[in-house]
Amino acid sequence: MGNHQQAKEYYERALSIQLKKLGPEHTDVPRTLHSLGNLHKAMGNHQQAKEYYERALSIQLKKLGREHTDVPLTLHSLGNLHKAMGNHQQAKEYYERALSIQLKKP
């Protein structure tokens, strides 16, 4: 519906609840961080989006492992973000990491 500010408030509220009730490294937290990254990317706040995606990826790698199905999604989002920012080499590296993981899955 295009109401980014309202969506941001809801995501931030959800994140606050998750952090308080589940802890900062709970496996549900990266999904909300990823959603916040998507929202900020849509709003043109690329640096903020990058921070959310990187936080999500860090938790995923630590708690879920490198080959978990959520990891390539976050890597792909980071690739898309870097592409939008004109960082094509960095985007390519994220895409290649995502593809490498996906190709290992049956």
Image (cartoon, rainbow, N blue to C red):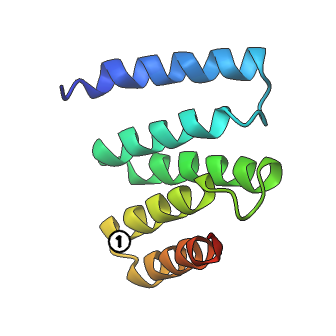
The image position of residue 27, as x and y in percent, is 72, 37
Position of 106 relative to 20 (above/below): below
The location of residue 7, given as percent across then percent down, is 36, 23
Please name the residue that numbered disc 1 is placed on: 83
**What's the residue type where badge 1 is placed?**
Lys
Q: Dividing the image into 4 quarters, which one contains the C terminus?
A: bottom right
Q: Image point 44% across, 17% down: which residue?
A: 10
Viewer-proximal residue, 13 or 86? 13
Residue farthest to the bottom?
89
Where is residue 74 drawn, in percent x and y? 54, 56
Which residue extends farthest front? 106
Residue sitting farthest toward the left: 1
Callout 1: helix, strand or loop? helix
Residue in view at x 60 percent, y 52 percent:
70
Would you place residue 67 above or below residue 29 in this image? Answer: below
Q: How many marks?
A: 1
Q: In the rendering, at what x and y percent does residue 55 appear?
A: 65, 48
Q: Measured along the vertical axis of the image, is residue 93 above or below residue 82?
A: below
